[in-house]
Image (cartoon, rainbow, N blue to C red):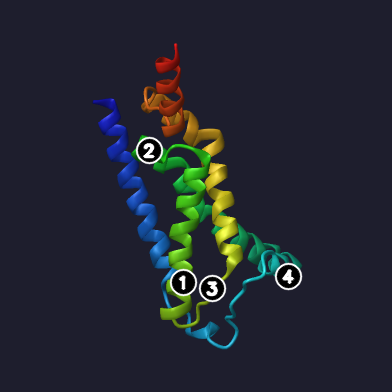
Amino acid sequence: MLRALVGTVALLAFTVCAAVVLKLTLTPSPASVGIAHTNLDPGTSIRLYLDQPSVREAALQIGGNILIGVPFGLLLPLISPRARGLLRVVLTTTFVVLILELTQHYFIEGRSFDVDDLILAAVGAVIGYVPVGRYLSLRIHPGHRHWWQRLLGSRRRTTA
């Protein structure tokens, strides 16, 4: 009963976060049409943000991209025990943000692809997962074992 309730609340919270992220990232930015550019060089945009005189603007850009990933680390492992694991959380986050970045690049006016957004979102997922997401997931889904734990467990039983 508690698992179902926590999973439902986590799914609802994740849906709300996804709606906010979609609104923020897929809204056209006509004012940026001439200045938006594709970045395939990791760290370039981050350095550009950090070199700006406005600390507030740098914090908004870097922090905002990190915050996009935090719900993945916190909520995905609560929604599904199969999503638990740092690698799974980071890969899922990176894949979803990659789809968002490609959508921005090809379909949204004034937006472009930026590899640093993928990196920062993955960092956000780690920040959400490591201190809290993993702990909560282990409490809600204590009996779930990863595929490699099941594989090793079945090998031990057959050889003993």
Label 2: state its secondary structure: helix
Quadrant where the C terminus sits is: top left
Instruction: Compare marks 3 and 1 and give the one earlier in the sequence.
Output: 1
**On screen, residue 76 above or below 47:** above
Q: Are marks 1 and 2 in contact (CB under 8 Å)?
A: no
Distance, label 3 to label 1, CA atoms, is 6 Å
Q: CA distance from mark 1 to mark 4?
A: 26 Å
Residue contact between numbered discs 2 and 4, judged by CB atoms under 8 Å = no
N-terminal-most mark, 1 or 4: 4
User: Given this view, does label 4 or label 3 mark the residue nearer the observer?
Assistant: 3
Mark toward the start of the polypeptide (2 vs 4): 4
Q: Which residue is mark 4?
A: 52
The residue that disc 1 covers is 102
Q: Which residue is label 2 attached to?
A: 82
Q: Spatial distance from mark 2 to mark 4, Cα to Cα? A: 41 Å
Q: Secondary structure at mark 4?
A: loop
Q: Residue 140's x, y, as percent?
A: 37, 27
Q: Which residue is mark 3?
A: 113
The residue that appears at 57% across and 43% down in the rendered structure is 127
Horizontally, residue 11 falls left or right of residue 127, namely left
